[in-house]
Amino acid sequence: MRAMVCSHYGGVDDLVWTDLPDPEPGPGTVLVDVAAAGVNFADLLMVSGRYQVRPDAPFVPGFEVSGRVAALGPGVGDLAVGDAVVAFVWHGGYAEKVVAPATQVFPWPDGLDPREAAAFLTGYMTAGHALLDRARLRPGETLVVLGASGSVGSAAVQVGAAVGARVVAVTGSDAGEALARRLGAAEVVRRDLVADAADVVASVCDGRGVDVVVDPVGGDGTRRWVDLLAPGGRLAVVGFAAGEIPRVPLDAVRRVEGELVGVYAGLVADRFPIENRRIVDRLSRMAAAGVIRPQVGAVFPLRDASRALRAVRDGVVPGRVVLSVR
């Protein structure tokens, strides 16, 4: 099979286009013929050695794929060869074939094409878990989504709107604003056009405060979002795309009886597969109903994975970046 290989930890240009032996499924695993693979910010961290999961090099990056079941390992009884599926893998997705744990292989959501299906799992698993489970978002609440044109952000805008929340999206471009409005944001704040996006959000909320903030960005600005929490407000800590883990004074959280909730969908996928399947099943029903839909902003051939990763790194594509494999 052909694959993009990270031969050593480094930059996105260090990936190598090469031939590898076809993998074989072991007990409890499934071999998937890959149709398309999603490209995530976490892939950038993994190939640079800065992600919490560090596979031994050489390895194939890529967290999520769409495709068809090619073979079943011993003990797998609820899937069949030929089934259309989406799969979550810690690495291995940038290839023509990948082996995935059967617990992390799910039916292909109705109504999605191969590229949309490849962009379904990680963003929506994270956004769905963050909003529905960890932050307990309720209809009528105000939700602020940071990085609203990215993978998790665009998913969070859709899930929040579907729940019935008032969604305030924070983004940094004309294309990001258009995307957020199309996905259901009631308000959009352009961080590239204002001195302090949090001040603008405060005025949009008429000083009442924010019920939930989804933060995949991190950095110095996180403190400002904590200050905007309404009584009982929740800040969902999703990631640190800004490159810096913020320091948050706990007295600011205590004053409003707020909550900082950690969100790590990969942990749920690994350690709580039944709970994770419940989340994915609910999101798949929402996708089949047309309530949510992955927004694919750019598609690259598999061998151009380095260029795709640069597009994610530079934030030049609103929505998802996907690799077309077959």
Image (cartoon, rainbow, N blue to C red):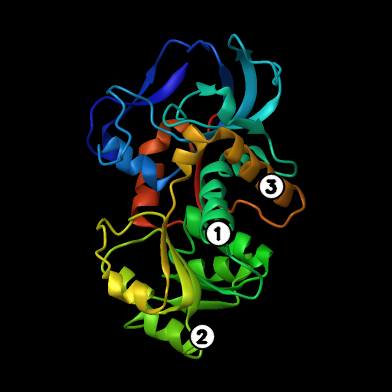
Q: Counting other residues with Cα less than 10 Å from the Cα at mark 3, is it few (<14), some (14-19), or many (20 or more)?
A: few
Inspect the image, locate mark 3, and give the three-letter code of the amino acid beneath it.
Arg
Q: Earlier in the sequence, mark 2 or mark 3?
A: 2
The residue that appears at 60% across and 77% down in the rendered structure is 186
Q: CA distance from mark 1 to mark 2?
A: 19 Å
Q: Is residue 193 visible?
A: no
Check disc 2 and report the residue beneath it: 205
Q: Nearer the viewer, residue 300 or 98?
A: 98
Position of the C terminus, as image quadrant, is: top right
Inspect the image, locate mark 1, and give the three-letter code of the amino acid beneath it.
Leu
Which of the labelled discs sits on residue 282, or is there none?
3
Q: Is residue 33 visible?
A: yes
Q: CA distance from mark 3 to mark 1?
A: 13 Å
Place residue 222 in its image quadrant: bottom left
Q: Are marks 3 and 1 in contact (CB under 8 Å)?
A: no
The residue that appears at 28% across and 64% down in the rendered structure is 219
Inspect the image, locate mark 2, and give the three-letter code of the amino acid beneath it.
Cys
The residue that appears at 64% across and 37% down in the rendered structure is 114
Q: Earlier in the sequence, mark 3 or mark 1?
A: 1
Place residue 32 in its image quadrant: top right
Q: Counting other residues with Cα less than 10 Å from the Cα at mark 2, is it few (<14), some (14-19), or many (20 or more)?
A: some
Which of the labelled discs sits on residue 243, or is there none?
none
Residue 1 in picture, x, y percent from top left: 47, 16
